[in-house]
């Protein structure tokens, strides 16, 4: 892949951040200018460095200038360090009388005011976010549970074969003595299409057909031998409307009708002849609406009855 082709992998937001990095802006200044969190800026910078094959802001800036991705003023001059010559010391008689007390106080106040005008603009400001920026949406903090009595038997955990790919925000679906680990986000904060299957009988993992759309913060439900996976979020936190169906027997994917609107980090459950999607993240905020998919009609609808409050990442039970 050529150097110029690497720019095609940068998203619009990553190009904006790269241009601001070239101007010398700090992470806090970039976050304030783009109305995002400092952590989001750091995540984008890691992605930019990885895609450009660099290790620092300086390398990224030089690369961007060399390739012409960032324009630099033609009359800009490189700063030159000036080394002051040693000053000569002369003994001069004090020809000025000491300042009056009121003059000393006035001079002190003027000095403090000047320092304040210089220092205050340099203090990092906490950005004001109109909506939360969530590249990866995790479950909301659970309700505290009272500790078990001392006499209660301790839980027994048994180690099994580790999942080949480390990831979070994936869909984990049990079916016929197997666990299907679908999608999610890897350690580099990139959504994945990976499907890995755990066989509890053999205590081993195998690879399944990749999901058509890379998505994180998803869930899946097994119904009549197939696994249904709606929605999900992209690397930028955008909620998608795709509805994809996995057939383990054929090890293949097919597409169903799109959701009425994008959702991720939702609750999902099957009941009778319908699939219910509760709340979730729509790309800007959490929802309180409930979507229902009819297996007979093969269509989605938004139910009139909403949840008591907006919520994400729930585990509904019927």
Image (spheres, grey):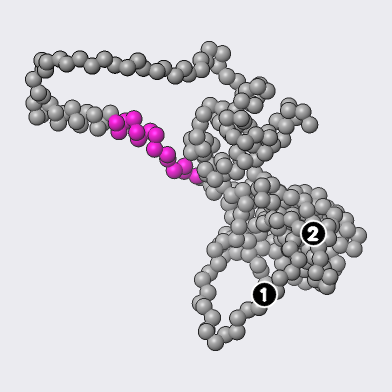
Residue 196's mark? 2
Vertically, is 190 above or below 204? above
Residue 133: percent from left, percent from top: 56, 47
Q: Which of the two residues, 44 or 214, is positioned nearer the viewer here? A: 44
SS label for mark 1: loop
Q: Is residue 123 magenta?
A: yes
Q: Residue at x 12, y 26 (%)?
A: 103
Identify the image quadrant of residue 304: bottom right
Query: In screen coordinates, is 76 left or right of 60?
Result: left
Crowding around mark 1 (Cα neighbors within 10 Å: few <14, some 14 to 19, many 20+) is: few
Identify the image quadrant of residue 305: bottom right
Q: Which residue is the extreme one toward the top?
A: 75
Q: How many marks?
A: 2
Cα separation, mark 2 vs mark 1, equals 22 Å
Vertically, is 2 above or below 229? above
Query: In screen coordinates, is 1 left or right of 147?
Result: right
Of the 4 image quadrants, the one containing the C terminus is bottom right
Q: Is residue 261 magenta?
A: no
Dot 2 or dot 1: first in sequence order is 1
Is any atom of residue 69 visible in this view? yes
Q: Residue at x 64, y 26 (%)?
A: 63
SS label for mark 2: strand
Q: Which of the two residues, 257 or 141, is positioned nearer the viewer here? A: 141
Identify the image quadrant of residue 207: bottom right
Residue 157's mark? 1
Provide the residue span drawn in magenta. Answer: 115-129
Residue 7: percent from left, percent from top: 70, 30
Query: In screen coordinates, is 26 left or right of 252?
Result: left
């Amino acid at each position: 892949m050529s150097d110029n082709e690497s720019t095609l992998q940068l998203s619009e937001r990553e190009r904006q951040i790269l241009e601001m990095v070239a101007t010398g802006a700090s992470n806090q200044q970039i976050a304030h200018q783009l109305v995002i969190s400092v952590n989001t800026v750091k995540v984008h910078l890691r992605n930019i460095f990885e895609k450009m094959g660099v290790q620092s802001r300086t390398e990224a800036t030089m690369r961007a200038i060399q390739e012409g991705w960032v324009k630099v003023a033609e009359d800009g001059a490189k700063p030159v360090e000036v080394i002051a010559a040693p000053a000569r010391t002369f003994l001069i008689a004090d020809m000025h009388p000491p300042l009056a007390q009121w003059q000393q106080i006035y001079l002190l106040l003027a000095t403090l005011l000047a320092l304040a005008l210089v220092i205050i603009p340099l203090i990092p400001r906490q950005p004001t976010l109109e909506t939360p920026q969530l590249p990866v949406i995790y479950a909301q903090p659970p309700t505290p549970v009272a500790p078990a009595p001392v006499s209660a038997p301790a839980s027994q955990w048994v180690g099994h074969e580790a999942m080949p790919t480390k990831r979070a925000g994936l869909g984990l679906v049990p079916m016929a003595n197997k666990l299907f680990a679908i999608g999610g986000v890897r350690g580099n904060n990139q959504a994945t299409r990976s499907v890995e299957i755990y066989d509890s009988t053999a205590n081993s993992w195998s690879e399944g057909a990749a999901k058509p759309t890379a998505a994180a913060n998803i869930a899946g439900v097994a119904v009549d031998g197939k696994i249904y996976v709606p929605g999900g979020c992209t690397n930028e936190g955008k909620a998608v409307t795709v509805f994809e169906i996995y057939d383990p027997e054929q090890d293949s994917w097919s597409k169903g009708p799109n959701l009425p609107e994008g959702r991720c980090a939702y609750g999902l459950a099957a009941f009778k002849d319908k699939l219910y999607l509760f709340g979730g993240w729509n790309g800007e905020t959490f929802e309180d609406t409930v979507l229902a998919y009819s297996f007979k009609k093969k269509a989605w609808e938004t139910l009139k009855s909403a949840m008591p409050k907006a919520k994400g990442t729930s585990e509904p039970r019927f």
